[in-house]
Structure formats: C-alpha cells, structure tokens
Image: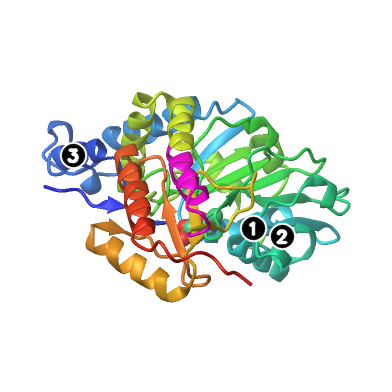
Amino acid sequence: MVRALNFSAGPAALPLPVLERAQQEFVNFKGTGMSIMEMSHRGKHYDAVHSEAKQRLKQLMNVPDTHEILFLQGGASMQFSMVPLNFLKEGSTAGYILTGSWSEKALQEAERIGKTFIVASSKESKYRSIPSKSDWKDDSGLSYLHITSNNTIYGTQWHEFPETNAPLVADMSSDILSRPLDISKFALLYAGAQKNLGPSGVTVVIAHKEWTASHSNSLSKFLDYNTHLKTDSLYNTPPTFSIYMLGLVLEWAEEQGGTDGLATLNKEKAELLYDCIENSGGFYRGHAEKGSESHMNVTFNLPDQELEKDFLGKAANEGFIGLNGHRSIGGCRASIYNAVPLEAVEKLADFMKVYRKNHPSRSFSFQ
Ligand SMILES: *Cc1c(COP(=O)(O)O)cnc(C)c1O
C-alpha cells in the first residue's frame, strides 16, 4: 500500500499507526465481539475510552484544575454561536480580532446575538499578518475577546498570545496540540477535531470552570456549556467513535514527545517549505508576512494563475493531495498538521525546487 502525500486542510491526514490500531480493533473491541460504535455510551468500555481521552488531553495540554475539557458536537462553527449565546449578555460588548475568514464568521454569529467591537483587524492588508498590540483599539470592559490562533485559509498564526484584561476566547481548530500552550491565559478555547486531533464529529472545548459557571444560556439547555460541564459531556449521546479516535491520536501524540516534540517537528516541517519559498528567487511568494507565518498552513503563490494551475496539476500527478488554496482566495496551500510526516514535506520541498528549476525564466511581477 502507498499512503497518499496528504496536505489537505481538513479533514486532514491522520497518523498511520492510529488508523491501523483502529482497524485492528474495529470489529472486536477488547474481546467484546462488538465495535466501539455499537456499544452504549453509558457502559464500562466506552466509559474508559471517554475518560482516558480526557485524561490524556489534560496531561498533554497541561490543563490546570481551574479548567474543564468538554467533548461537544457541531464543529467549531457551533462554537461561533455558543460563545456569544453564553457570554455576550445584554448591555455588554464582545471584542473580536479579525485575522481571516474564520474570525469573520465567528464575528457574524456574535453580531446576531448582541453588541460587538472589532478590536483589531488585518483585513485591509489581505490578512497577511497578525495585528500587533500597538494597533489594537481599547479592549477594556469587554465581556470577552475572541481570537483565531491559526488562520487556516490565509496561513498566519499567533506566535505569542496577547495580554488583555478581557477573558480570552480562542478558536484553535487548526493548531491545537501543535505546540505548548499556557491554558491559564484562556477563559475558553475550542477546536473542531478534524485538523489536528482526529476525525470530524467531536469538538474539543477547554473552559475555565468558574467563568463558565457564572454565565448561562437561558434559551437552550443544550447550547449552555454548563449542561455539558455538569454531565462530563454525557448529557446526551456523544460522538463515541470520534472520541475513541481522538484517544488514539492522543496516545500517538504522547509517543511523539507531547506538545514539545510536536512543536519541534512542526517547526522543522514549516521551515523546509518557507526556506524553499524564500530561496526561489521570487518564483514562489508566501502570503504571510514575516513573523506571522503559520507552522500549520503554508500559503503561497506562483508568478501567475496559469502557472499555479500547471503547478497544482503536476503536483497532483506526483501524488500530492490537497495543495490548492481555499476556494475563496486561490493560490496554493500546504497543510502540514501534526500527522503529516516530515518525509512528505521533504518530498514536497524537493518537488517545488525541481518545478522552479524547470521554469528558469519566470519570476514575480506582482502588482
Ligand atoms: C476548519 C475551521 C473552522 C470550521 O470548523 P468546523 O468544524 O467545520 O465548523 C473554524 N475555525 C477554524 C480556524 C478552522 O480551521
């Protein structure tokens, strides 16, 4: 079997050992004669899967006892609604920092619920960077401040998190578990699993318990974080198979040296591609500005669209999957999440170098 060179943005590559383990256990989980998918979510086998996944994540991400881990459904997109439904009360204002399409979507949901304020935005410079603190507007008195830690579509990432007096809420869908993190800085963070944690279907939320308990959503019990806090994410049937897979991915992450080991590897992978872009004599141009480059999604352009199309076509012929940029901005994007092996990234860098060599007379003439 030849594994694809998978650079998809999400759902994305999963570690091969995880898939193989799931395959082994698929039909007969721990000698029960059943798949994990066929069992009660209140039974002892699933219970162990559920609590082990939570415990592993707590350890890997160094989650302090002030915070609780939730396994929800609905993707990051449902969190765009749940956050303002719970924390944006009448008479208060929620702050948003716009760094790409996903933060815009998060803002749009909050606008439906209450008053919002854009504290900073890099939209005018085509989301090439993360706004620096000196460009922020006044962030005092906000009910919370929402940021997107990694911008999957534009390929930028916060490399340091800002000091703010507002409770900090972060969408970490595309870089959770990719590096060490000080969870105590965040009131709440969330991530759909399908980029860095496992298959789609489960959304991880890490919430400050007291802050969350001091708010509620009177409209819907299900969309109230406290419902899930009080029931250990077992208020209703959780996405059992996705949580099982998450647990396997977390076990694999431990074997990679946890977030420290993963961060080192991710940096090495990202540098391979950024170096290749930088040393291409202007043939490839990165979208992100220096200092804001994502270690998860490397976005770049070629001198013109025709050449981009040719590049993507040739790359596809060589077995590279998912290198086209998001449909909203075009160009090229290599998503190199935790599970994308170094060897795949090396192959891509080699391919890019050869392709550049084969087009010696071309260089950039950007507007
Ligand atoms: C993919 C993505 C989303 C959307 O996630 P869903 O789980 O599909 O709702 C939101 N935010 C970011 C940063 C993403 O990368």
Of discs 2 and 1, which sits in the foreground?
Answer: 1
Say whether disc 3 or disc 2 marks the residue closer to the N-terminus.
3
Q: Secondary structure at mark 3?
A: helix
What segment is highlighted magenta in the picture? Answer: 269-283
What residue is disc 2 on?
A: 122
Q: 323 or 12: nearer the eye?
A: 323
107 w.r.t. 150: above or below? below
Q: Secondary structure at mark 2?
A: loop
- Please tell me how many numbered marks the rendered image carries: 3
Q: Main secondary structure of the magenta part?
A: helix
Q: CA distance from mark 3 to mark 2?
A: 42 Å
Q: 328 or 23: nearer the eye?
A: 328
x and y, in percent, of residue 13 in the image: 32, 49
Q: Secondary structure at mark 1?
A: loop
Disc 1 to disc 3: CB gap under 8 Å:
no
Of discs 3 and 2, which sits in the foreground?
Answer: 2
Q: 87 or 19: nearer the eye?
A: 19
x and y, in percent, of residue 269 in the image: 42, 39
x and y, in percent, of residue 317 in the image: 23, 63
For image coordinates 67% across by 68% down, the residue present is: 108
- Disc 1 residue type? Arg
What residue is disc 1 on?
A: 128
- Disc 3 residue type? Glu
Instruction: Specify few, some or many for label 1: CA neighbours under 10 Å numbering under 14, 14-19, or 20 or more.
Output: many
Report whether 280 appears left or right of 88: left
Residue 222's quadrant in the figure? Answer: bottom right
Q: 359 or 5: nearer the eye?
A: 359
